[in-house]
Image (cartoon, rainbow, N blue to C red):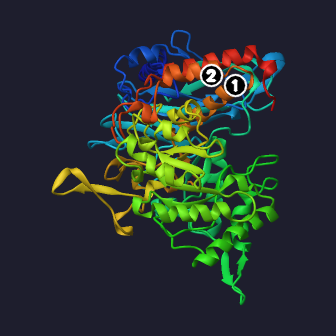
Amino acid sequence: MSRMIVRAVAGCVAALVAAVAFAADVNVWAVPDGYKIDKFGKKIFVIDPKQDLGAIKRKNILWDADAKTIALAAARGETLAFQLGIEGEAQGLKDVNVQSSDLVGPNGAKLSAAQLELFKIYYTEVNDKGSGATNGPTMGKGWYPDALVPWALGDSNTYGGYDGPPFAVKPNEIQGVWIDLAIPYGTPAGQYAGTLTVSAAGANAATVKVSLKVRDFDIPRKIHAVFFMNGGVDDMNQSGGGWLDTPAKRQKYEEQMYVDSRRHRFTCGNMYDESRPNVTTNADGTLKVDWAGYDGRFGKVLSPTNNIFGTGQDAIEVWKVPLFTGIKSGNAQFPPGEKAWDQMIVEIKNHWKEKGWDISRAYAYLADEPPRGQAEKLNDYAKRVKNSPGPNLGRQIAVYTILGKSWTEQKPIFDLWKDNLDWWMVAGDYYNVPDMDALAKDHKKAFYQGGEPYQGNETLDADGIAMRTWSWIAWQYKLDYECYYSMTEAWRKATPDPRNPDRFIQGRGRAGENNDNEIWDHPRNRTWAISQGVFIYPGKKVNFDLPIWNIRTKQIRRGQTDYEYFWLLKQAGEERLANDLCKKVLNVALSEAASAPEQYGYGKWSHNPADWDNAVQAAGDRLEQIKDKLPKE
């Protein structure tokens, strides 16, 4: 062998040894699910200036950087979430991947690695003035984490492309990884341990220890805080450019919306759905109703014994029946004619009884935010439903500006409707606690979107606990349900006004709406809001024919699970503790947070995620102490 070859080989070996010796470690940290951190890892989207991101990266309620350990606690039946932040550092990273081990517990019990569901966080830029006022205040400009792309989805070249695992992290950026950890019912209580390994090409892998305490009680299967968000598969299909191009794909997508919503402890509602049975009139003037098509589509969620939620699972929690007044509802009267309309009420009740569906979960949606001029007519419709033969059928109206601009103006509407309307769904920024509390005990009370300080905002540029507040508000004010108008608003589009860039114009018609995945990178979908009502992203961008959920959806699940902690305390005779824990963090909301409707500003609750997590941790500790008093699943 020549000296030249020997020198060359020696040089290569030395370079390889040096590269191995000086390979950088992957820099990784973890935070709870309540933090929204920008893609540069420099900013928390939150109003609380006391929150030091550098300190939070080093240590927080679940993470200890010195020990490289994530410490978690959850009950059986709970899905908890946390986030990893992977730093690109100055040089960037390539071929980044994350792998989980099994979690091993007492007496060899195991939680499979499959119980940890990984998502790559997608960042969307807000580059204008943001949401407001009805959906304010905004957390400002920046790159917000939101869409959660399932880990199994690889690279895509569709609409700007997507870099799936193993992926690159650009220099001076981070990449967030969202992890859902589901604790199955029946899991033995105790301490479990495992690891997460974060690897990258040319770098030393980071191994993070995971310590999980499985608490010795169960989160109820039954959802005690009904929360429904309406949605439509056609809206999502449009927002993705019609990529769900067969009836079978659209049906599968719709079914997955129902199932995934249940998994996140809320309901996929049908408040704006126009589906109806085929109705004709017999010679004697009676109705003939053909329910076949309706039952074929919706029986799979309405049936208590044979539904798509799984063996032994409950039917859908709430449902709008096919009965329309034609008043501010987007639909003409159905069926047309007052006599036919009254007959249809009885037909619906009879059909629900025949099918074994629960009529107490059903309601007639009489109007969507009607004006005062329609109040008397709506009261008549509500009275007719109330007085129809058979079991009670709920009567619901979305109550908004009809109530007036001050709390004292609301009494006339309450006095008019109080005997006939029994599902009171009031906008959060018009929800007057004393008037609502004065309703009859058998009336259902609810709020829908209204903005801070009445309740948390649903927009992209809200903070990390915004939607979590809703369920806590429901607990504190003893509400029966919550509603968000639509989770499938990815199809809407607003653009800057050429005459004034701080104003926006709402798109009209298909040409002015989102038709090809634009919502991923252009979040202005309302003249007043950023990504309002976007809880699902169209999957065409990542070659996926099922829903892509987001961080805001996970906030709802966290709040709904928190509610169950409070509910369990109440069952064990410790309602006072539940109320105290809730009140300490939430403080006030709805009308107690403002002197009048539409007085927008920051919520009066804590905006520090640690305060919310600490309250739930305290509830969990107490529930373990009194576990013998708790219901078992």
Q: How crowded is the residue under tag 1: few (<14 C-alpha within 10 Å), some, or many (20+)?
A: some
Quadrant where the C terminus sits is top right
Between residue 158 and residue 441, name the one nearer to us: 441
Where does residue 356 sit, x and y in percent of width and height? 81, 59
Q: Residue at x 39, y 55 (%)?
A: 518
Between residue 518 and residue 366, name the one nearer to us: 366
Where does residue 146 sit, x and y in percent of width and height? 46, 40
Say what secondary structure mark 2 lies in.
helix
Residue 618 visible in this rendered orientation of the protein: yes
Q: Amino acid at mark 2?
A: Ala
Between residue 463 and residue 249, name the one nearer to us: 463
Q: Closer to the N terminus: mark 2 or mark 1?
A: 1
> Residue 570 shows which numbered tag?
1
Label 2, label 1: how many angstroms apart (C-alpha)? 7 Å
Residue 99 vs 410, above or below: the answer is above
Residue behind mark 2: 578
Horizontally, residue 311 falls left or right of residue 525, namely right
Between residue 465 and residue 572, name the one nearer to us: 572
> Residue 422 shows which numbered tag?
none
Horizontally, residue 597 falls left or right of residue 83, namely left
Which image quarter: residue 338? bottom right
Where does residue 320 sit, x and y in percent of width and height? 62, 59
Residue 494 vs 438, above or below: the answer is below
Q: Tell me if label 2 and label 1 are in contact, CB under 8 Å.
A: yes
Q: Amino acid at mark 1?
A: Lys
Q: Residue at x 65, y 66 (%)?
A: 248
Can you name the residue that lies furthest to the bottom here? 283
Residue 329 visible in this rendered orientation of the protein: no
Q: Residue at x 55, y 54 (%)?
A: 230
Horizontally, residue 608 falls left or right of residue 442, namely left
Q: How crowded is the residue under tag 2: few (<14 C-alpha within 10 Å), some, or many (20+)?
A: many
